[in-house]
Amino acid sequence: MNSSSLKNVHCSLEPEEGSSIRTVLLEHKEETPVGRTPECLIDDVRVSRVQVILSADFSREEVTIKRIGRNPSFLNGSCMVKDKEYTAQNNNILELVENGYKYRVKFSKSVECASPPKEAKLNIVHETQSPPLKKMKPRELSPPQNRENGIEWIETRKALLLCKYGPVNYQIQNIRSQNELFQVAAFDLDGTIIKTKSGKVHPKGPTDWMLWNDKVPLALKKLHNNGYLIVVISNQASLKYHANINPFKSKVDAILEHLDVPMIVMISTDEDFFRKPAPGMWFYLREVVLGVSFLKWSINPLIISTNYQPSLFWYFI
């Protein structure tokens, strides 16, 4: 199979129907770790942070799987020996741990178009519907032209960092002045907005990041243009062990400048009430940042699917 044909081949690990874990996309001859990570939506302690490592060969339509984790993994029902490589083919079943987290290996091919396709439009699907909110008028809020005016870091208290990018204060005041409903789209950072460039579970440094996919900026800009206040909420408890957190701030600065969408970033830096899933950051956003005593909320999955690269975002209203 030549290199041009390989571009039309896609490989993924598809969760069994009804599972809450994510589809895992595999690249040609690139190692992909799968385990207890935010990217995989797995927090079961039976699963190691890197339970298995996979590498797909698109030309052979095979996936090499090596078990790294302490607890046994299974391929087609057979127990995998630790550190031994196994070969999986289309429709084979990988089970990360016994009676849990089953994936089906899937190879597929896309059909080439006879003529160049039009630019793909963002496909947004709401799987569950929340009560309709008041329609907000789209606003032209131009982002600041320079870094000094564009990014503002606020150390609110010991275990919470807050960063604002762009004219979010104006956006909040504008909503209040028109007595409109706040519509807040809140996202996690790691495994949702970004992922590691190295493919490691944890970043190797402040530059080890890339967007989850190239449609992330379009999705955020569309929400912003529809009147949503964009908020990123992230747990970063490891920062409490760092005397200098400026490298992490520089990383967030770079992400914000790359996205170029007005938003608020809230960072929990300790194991306390502000750490997700505890509601501390949400309460702080509601009562201090937005200045409201009550905010109805619902959770809806927002699926962005382009070119076989699905990404799952959670947003709050």
Image (cartoon, helix red, strand yellow):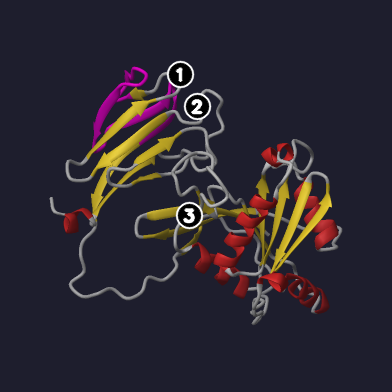
Q: Amino acid at mark 2?
A: Ser
In the rendered image, residue 99 lying in the magenta stretch gets the answer: yes
Of residues 217 and 97, the one drawn nearer to the viewer in this rendering: 217
The reply to whether residue 112 is in sight is yes
Q: Residues within 10 Å of mark 1 (few under 14, many from 20)?
A: some
| Circle 1/circle 2 CB separation < 8 Å | yes
The quarter of the image holding the C terminus is bottom right
* Among the two numbered marks 3 and 2 on one chain, the one whose residue lies closer to the N terminus: 2
Q: Amino acid at mark 1?
A: Asn
Q: Along the horizontal axis of the image, is 146 left or right of 74? A: right
Residue 183 vertical position relative to residue 191 in the rendered view, above or below: below
Q: Residue furthest front?
A: 244
**Which region shows up in magenta?**
75-103
The image shows residue 176 at horizontal and vertical percentages of 81, 74
Residue holding disc 2: 48
Residue holding disc 1: 71
In terms of secondary structure, where does tag 1 sit?
A: loop
In 3D space, how far apart are the residues under numbered discs 3 and 1 (Cα atoms)?
A: 29 Å
* Among the two numbered marks 1 and 2 on one chain, the one whose residue lies closer to the N terminus: 2
| Number of marks drawn | 3
Location of residue 193 (image quadrant)? bottom right
Q: Along the horizontal axis of the image, is 44 left or right of 76? A: right
Residue at left 67%, top 43%? 236
Residue holding disc 3: 212
Residue 59 vertical position relative to residue 78 in the rendered view, above or below: below
Q: Along the horizontal axis of the image, is 47 left or right of 307? A: right
In terms of secondary structure, where does tag 3 sit?
A: loop
In 3D space, how far apart are the residues under numbered discs 1 and 2 (Cα atoms)?
A: 8 Å
Q: Residue furthest left?
A: 1
